[in-house]
Every structure is written in structure tokens, then in C-alpha cells.
Image (cartoon, grey):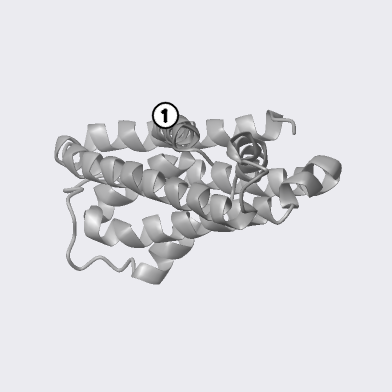
Amino acid sequence: MAINTWWLYVTAVFLISAIPGPNMLHVMIQSIHHGPRRALASMAGLMSAVLICLVASAAGLGALLKASPRVFDLLRYAGAAYLIWLGIKAWRAPVGGDVAVDPHTRHAAPALYAAGFGTGMSNPKLIIFAAALFPQFLDASRPFWTQLAILVASFVVIEGFWYAVYAFGGRSLARWLAPADRQRAFNRGTGIVFIGFGGVLLGSRV
């Protein structure tokens, strides 16, 4: 892979990762309620899901999903249901009090990790995306796995950067959300967004 090809890939992934989606919204919400430090567990869960999807795509699962619409539909329905459930949960979240970090919060790191992992795994389109993206930047005359490792590592670094941006942005937003009416509006707004993501996933096609 030539250096200019790698830069093109980095630019594309940087711009794509910046677009708000379920992962970034999840990071921001966890940062608002638990602070950026605790949100690291959520980021780790999301990143684990991303890595699994990227590796699965490299192993040929992306081609399998394209060739087996029923398998893809099962994953899509499960992912959409999870996102819609997150939306309903956000809509019904209690309000009142300070949304700043509670040092006595009961949300342990494993629970935050699991929630992040579930959110990250809720969209099988990432596998299709990777299967479509990677071949555009691979040089058939060079070692495949070396190039793939570079692409995956670059993706992880860029994705992690945007997680941090959204996490610290969420922590700043927490101060603005002190009034209960703003908390309620935010909870319902994020609930609608998650439900919308689920609806889009249900309406998507391979």
C-alpha cells in the first residue's frame, strides 16, 4: 500500500467516523452520566465490537452476509431491536437532580463495557462497510495481512480519537443539562435518535 493511498484511506475514515451515529451517541451519553473516565469502559466495549466486525469482514463474513440475505436480516433485526430498546430506555430515563458524575454510581465497568459492546454489535452494516472499503485500498502485489493490519490499526486510532471528542463534549454538556426540563428534553431527543437508528437499520438493504 502506497503512502498516498494510506492517507486517502485515513482521510475517508476520519470523515466517516466523525458523523454522529449510535456509537458516538452512546459514548456521549455515558460521559454525561458517568464522566469520561468511567466512559472508557463503554469505549472499550464499542471498540471490541468494531474490531470483531473488522476482523470478521476480513475473514469473509462480509461476503457471506451479501450471499445470505436471511443471515443478514436476522442480524439486522436483532440490532434494530436493541437500538429501539435503547431509545425507549433513554426516553423513560428519570430526570431531576444534577447529571454531573456521581462518585457513588452503581454502574460498574463490566456493565458499561457490556452496554457499549451491545451497541457496537447492533449494526451488522459495519461488516459490509469494511468489506466494501478495505479492497479499495489494498495492493494485490503487497502482503495482504500486513496491509490489513495497517488499515485496522488506523481505523481503531481514528475511531478512538472521535470517542474521546464525544466523551469530553458530553462532559461539558452535562453542566448545561442541570435543569430537569433540559434533562427530559435531552433524554427524549436521544431516545428518538436511537429509535430512528433502529428504524433506518430495519429499512436498510445489503
Quadrant hosting residue 197: top right
Between residue 107 and residue 125, name the one nearer to us. Answer: 125
Give the residue at mark 1.
Answer: 15
Under mark 1, the amino acid is: Leu
Tell me if residue 106 comes above or below residue 85 in the rendering: below
Q: Looking at this rendering, what residue extends furthest in the front direction?
A: 141
| Label 1 residue SS | helix
- Return the x and y of residue 14 as percentages of the image width and height: 40, 34
Name which residue lies at 52% across and 52% down: 50
Q: Is residue 51 above or below residue 198?
A: below
What residue is drawn where x is 39% and y is 32%?
A: 18
**In this view of the protein, can residue 118 be seen by the observer?**
no
Q: Quadrant of the N terminus?
A: top right
Q: Quadrant of the C terminus?
A: top right
Of residues 188 and 77, the one drawn nearer to the viewer in this rendering? 77
The quadrant holding residue 139 is top right
Residue 147: x, y in percent?
55, 50
Neighbor class of circle 1 (other Cα within 10 Å; few <14, some 14-19, many 20+) is few
Q: Write the residue at 74% across / 30% down.
A: 205
Q: Nearer the viewer, residue 144 or 173?
A: 144
Which x, y percent locates residue 41? Answer: 35, 62
User: Which of 195/20 is in front?
Assistant: 20
Q: Position of residue 22 (x, y in %)?
A: 47, 40
